[in-house]
Amino acid sequence: MQPGQHMSADIAAQPKIYADLVARQSELAGVAAKIAERRPRFALLAARGSSDHAALYAKYLIEVLLQLPAGLVSPSTTTLYGARPDLTDVLLVSVSQSGGSPDLLEVTESARRQGALTVAVTNTPDSPLNLAAELSVDVGAGPEVAVAATKTYSATLLALYLLIDAVRGGKGEQAAKLGELAQRTLDESQAAVDEAVQRFRFVNRVLTTGRGYSSATAAEAALKLAETSYLSARSYSGADLLHGPVAAVDAETGVLAVTSSGQGGAAMREVLDVVHSRGADVFAVGSAAAKVSAALRIPVAESAEEVAPMLEVLPVQRLALGLSLARGGDPDSPRGLNKVTKTR
């Protein structure tokens, strides 16, 4: 078995997974209709790891598309401190690829007792989390053998988009061609990813950044680089970056900037002008990569801004895979990690 074989196959499978999931839009619309009937006044999202980044993406979707306030749950307030807030008329969405983490299970069970409408979004339909929640969504990514999440992460993003879009009465129109666009992105980005691997293989400190919907991709990029290539990687919102952390950026810093067409990408231009002027090696990924200050750019197929994270993450995953292999690692089995992490 060649190192990285499973991760490579999972990445390549994503265009078909997107197309299959879009074809199930009506199934997710059924769940969305039940959410809309309850007219939640607030949304909470509970998740860990890569799923936490998917939840961050969903937070933007809920606040922008549904015009509802949304927040990310701190599971320990329930599991360690025993908090039991009144969650009447609150929507709780628990996001977990495995649906097996004890803390998310306890949060979901507690929230349901406290009056919340609970929804599980997982890749494991018969998981304890699905059984605990009132409603559930299967992201349909299929078995993922590699420890580093790739196809389960992106499928979760798409499932959340289709669900939230359907709550407002949409039919997933912006996602209709994602399978085709994903294949195009993978095909057209490989050469630039290979170049980025050679430029970044000896870097030990990486900063990732993005704004808006792309903040989730930047956070996921930092996690992927840390867990597969053992890099010291940290993610910042483009706005937060200028509030202090930019002082630590110099010529020894690798910067991965996620910037796609739309308001979030436009807001990154000034940020990257500052970062680039400090001598950092900036690697820009996204459909607006050509419009920002960077030493290396990976263009991504154009899409509506709210679905761009499903495309942006593809070359980022390929970068993590390539860097891990170039540095002598095996991204299928990162040291000290298991496929399912159970926390409380």
Image (cartoon, rainbow, N blue to C red):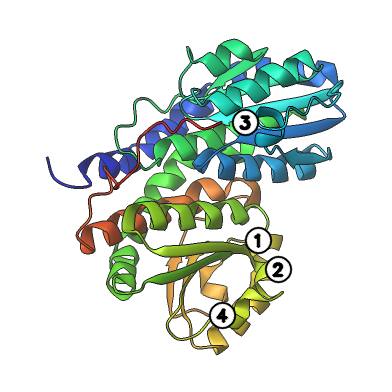
Task: Identify the secondary structure beneath mark 3.
Answer: helix
The amino acid sitting under disc 2 is Ala
Which one is nearer the viewer's eye here, 95 or 35? 95
Left or right: 214 as drawn, with respect to 45:
left
Kindly report which numbered mark, 4 or 3, lies closer to the viewer in this rendering.
Answer: 4
Q: Residue at x 83, y 27 (%)?
A: 85
The amino acid sitting under disc 4 is Ala
Q: Which mark is residue 30?
A: none
Instruction: Quickly name the residue at label 4.
Output: 248
Q: In the rendered image, which quarter is residue 320 located in? A: bottom left
Q: How many marks?
A: 4
Residue 96, above or below 56:
above
Kindly report which numbered mark, 1 or 4, lies closer to the viewer in this rendering.
Answer: 4
Between the residue at mark 2 and the residue at mark 3, the CA separation in whole angstroms equals: 28 Å
Q: Residue at x 87, y 29 (%)?
A: 41
Whether pointer 1 and pointer 4 mark residues with C-beta atoms closer than 8 Å, the reply is no
Furthest residue toward front: 81
Q: Which mark is residue 162?
A: 3
Instruction: Quickly name the residue at label 2.
Output: 239
Kindly report which numbered mark, 1 or 3, lies closer to the viewer in this rendering.
Answer: 1
Left or right: 70 as drawn, with respect to 257:
right
Which one is nearer the viewer's eye here, 19 or 5? 5
Left or right: 189 as drawn, with respect to 50:
left
